[in-house]
Amino acid sequence: MSICNFYFTIADIATAKADVIVNAANGWGYMGGKKARKGLLSGVAESLNYATKGEMEAYTLQKARRFEKIPSFLFGKHCGEIFLSPPFGLNCYEVIHAVTVRSPGSRSNLKTICILANAIYTYCRETGHHTVAIPMLGAGTGGLDECEVEKIISKTAILFPELSVRIYSKAED
């Protein structure tokens, strides 16, 4: 008997109601900067930055650093890593920042998405979270094909039947 534990939604992920919201992050912690605080832009990180009035980006810029006194662009997070932040007013318990690209504007790859999907779902299982709002990791700025990303996210979700996974794709303007 097969149970579908994932659903596809076309909406802004910043409006999601889930235990965990996932952000498609870069290893430096930038989330669109000041321009994303003034107006809603198209990316996942920019949308979350806008919804949290810049609070999340201020936090992630520090959290992405490996060493306190060295900038994250020198020694930031690597592709395939995840790190956490508080929700800063979003309707979730915490946000998982999934590093899909090393630096802002660079490209991702499908192997990284496989690693991240497993890491995200494993973290949720281990911490008792049941609902996950996850975007099309790497399909925006990362340049990956949405269909390929959706396959990876949904096939990995099947391995975690205790989770309810909602895959978010933002509507075209």
Image: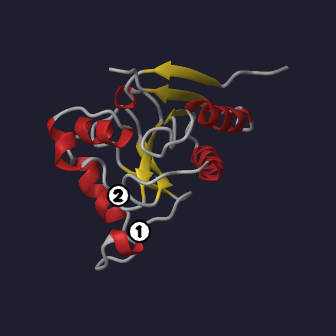
Does 100 sit above or below residue 43? below
Residue on which disc 2 sits:
29
Under tag 1, what secondary structure?
A: loop
In the rendering, at what x and y percent does residue 114 appear? 65, 47
Does 33 sit above or below residue 5? below
Residue on which disc 1 sits:
76
Residue drawn at point x = 58 percent, y = 50 percent: 109
Residue 160 placement: quadrant: top right
Distance between the alpha carbons at the discs numbered 1 and 2: 8 Å
Residue 47: mark in rendering: none
Residue drawn at point x = 51 percent, y = 35 percent: 136
Q: How is the image coloured?
A: secondary structure
Q: In the figure, is residue 161 to the left or right of 19?
A: right
Q: Amino acid at mark 1?
A: Gly
Residue drawn at point x = 75 percent, y = 21 percent: 3
Q: Amino acid at mark 2?
A: Gly
Number of marks in the image? 2
| Quadrant in which the N terminus is drawn | top right
Residue drawn at point x = 27 percent, y = 42 percent: 49
Q: In the figure, is residue 110 to the left or right of 40?
A: right
In the rendering, at what x and y percent does residue 153 appear? 63, 36
In the rendering, at what x and y percent does residue 56 appear? 28, 48
In the rendering, at what x and y percent does residue 41 appear? 27, 34
Residue 106 placement: quadrant: bottom left
Q: Are marks 1 and 2 in contact (CB under 8 Å)?
A: yes
> In front: 87, or 173?
173
Between discs 1 and 2, the one toward the N terminus: 2
Q: Few, some or many C-alpha atoms within 10 Å of disc 2 (few <14, some 14-19, many ≥20)?
A: many
> In front: 74, or 11?
74
